[in-house]
Amino acid sequence: MDIKEIQNLIKFVAKSGASEVKLETGDFKITIKTTPESLANEGIAVVQHLPVQTQVSQPQIVEPKQVAATTPTKTESDDSKYVTIKSPMIGTFYRKPSPDKPPFVEVGSEIKAGSTLCVIEAMKLFNEIESEVSGRVVKILVDDSSPVEFDQPLFLIDPS
């Protein structure tokens, strides 16, 4: 197992939420331990790589992401009157049908239920995402060509 495979394993364990994973093969033994704090910050607390022949302990700490504390603001409370269009899948978000075409919608665009808002590419398939409601686009929450997660908010629509 090379260092790249070990790094991928570390990332997988960090995202999975497991507290400890042990992997043993004929050549070596790897133990990856995480703490609740490191999982919250998507980091690994301690990683040990212990070859069978010689015992070497090399801790590797992944830099935690800084999480800013948020307090409700006036705009957040105002957003409650809007309908949120969320991503139905994991993929890449595109605002345009193709690079040389204009975006499907802009902020302020009037839309009808069933209007195409964007395209999400998943496994080389381009899926049109349609509006569930009629109204006006208030906010586009994702940048063009950005990866999106399942159930991630994409648009805010004012249905009035």
Image (spheres, rainbow, N blue to C red):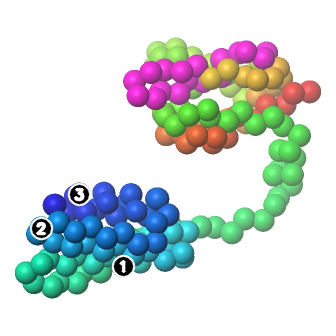
Disc nearest the viewer among 1 and 2: 2
The residue indicated by pointer 1 is 46
Q: Amino acid at mark 1?
A: Val
Q: Is residue 124 above or below residue 18?
A: above
By secondary structure, the bulk of the magenta-drawn segment is best described as: strand
Q: Amino acid at mark 2?
A: Gly
Q: Residue at x 84, y 37 (%)?
A: 82
Mark carried by residue 26: 2
Q: Residue at x 27, y 78 (%)?
A: 48
Image quadrant containing the C terminus: top right
Q: Amino acid at mark 3?
A: Glu
**Extreme residue toward the right, this view:** 160
The residue indicated by pointer 3 is 5
Q: Is residue 47 above or below residue 57?
A: above
Q: Residue at x 71, y 33 (%)?
A: 85
Q: Earlier in the sequence, mark 3 or mark 2?
A: 3
Mark carried by residue 76: none
